[in-house]
Image (cartoon, grey):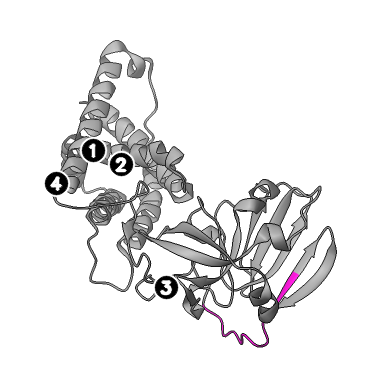
Amino acid sequence: MAGRRTNLALLVALLIAMGTGVGAFAVGTATGRAVVVSHGVAGIAVAVLAPWKQQIVRRGLRRRRRARWAGLALLVTTVVTLASGVAQAVGAAVPVPVTVMQVHVGAAVLMLIPIVWHVRTRPVRPRVGDVSRRALLRAGGVAVMAAAGWAAAERVYAAAGVTRRFTGSHERGSDDPARMPVTQWLADAAPTVDPDRWVLSIEDRSGSRRLALADLRAAPPRSRRAVLDCTGGWYAAQTWTGVPLADLVDVRDAQRLVVTSLTGYSRAFPVAMVDDLLLALDVAGTPLSVGHGAPARLVAPGRRGFWWVKWVTHIGVDDRPSWLQMPFPAR
């Protein structure tokens, strides 16, 4: 494959991998499995193109250009991203104080810098010949090899006894909260909470009111089996017990409800989801620990972990559309 076409194909594969990677973070139900599969196939496509790209890199290194750091940076970040992706798939750990998934995402984000540099300094302009029958056949061949490589890898993982959820997450601490990892989104840190002074404020169509933990404990408890699937690469199936939001919040004529943490972290949900949401006080028959959101956390079945707001102190409704928020929290 010619160098220019290799670069163009590699750029497309990397962009698809990054786009589906972002999408995979948002996938919480099995209907989104295609996004996760596409991410894996795109990653294999990058590996398939590696032999052709290697020749281009060797020629570039011999020229001793001042900007060859960008090529080396792209090579290193690509290798780390692919390697950590495989490590995440098999459930391996890394000898650093971060998760494999964090290494994978971090390397992918860093990869954007040399990609942008390459595109700006040595743009690969599409040509009419890029959509010729021969070019399309080559692209189809790469896609078939990538799909076959992904399918083969999945068979190898299965044969080795590797079990994952459709999101790629591995089981950690199901029905055993003590083994369930304690993680927060980005810089959100576990606060100090006094259960005796903790208060839940609710502002809805019926007005404003404040409830103490004892008030919630006095309500008829409801239990729900739900899977907490963290974007850190793990999941845990637990039985959560607490008070349904439908019993707490009056959502008449509202468009969304907003759940806010003691730390200021918040997520907005369409009011149509109110029957699915639970304000959990217990997990697996025991009170929540502070690390897992005590005294109360949100349970949002079908949503990834960053939607499960911890240390909930405020629930409100408004007339704004639920999508009018950052897809991923900025803090």
**From the image, which quarter does the C terminus lie in?**
bottom right
Give the mark nearest the N terminus, 1 or 2.
2
Give the mark nearest the N terminus, 2 or 3.
2
Q: Residues within 10 Å of mark 1 (few under 14, many from 20)?
A: many
Amino acid on which disc 1 is placed: Trp
Name the front one of labels 1 and 4: 4
Snapshot quadrant of residue 135: top left
Name the front one of labels 2 and 3: 3
Q: How many marks?
A: 4
Q: Residues within 10 Å of mark 4 (few under 14, many from 20)?
A: few
What residue did someone put label 1 on?
A: 150
Magenta stretch, residue numbers: 190-201
Image position, residue 48 (x, y; %): 20, 36
Image position, residue 52 (x, y; %): 18, 34
Circles 1, 4 touching at the beta carbon (< 8 Å): no
Residue beneath the point at 76% across and 67% down: 202
What residue did someone put label 3 on?
A: 182
Q: CA distance from mark 1 to mark 4?
A: 14 Å
What residue did someone put label 4 on?
A: 159
Amino acid on which disc 3 is placed: Val
Q: Residue furthest top?
A: 133
The residue lying toward the viewer, choosing from 309 and 85, is: 309
Amino acid on which disc 4 is placed: Ala
What residue did someone put label 2 on?
A: 40
Snapshot quadrant of residue 262: bottom right
Q: CA distance from mark 1 to mark 2?
A: 7 Å
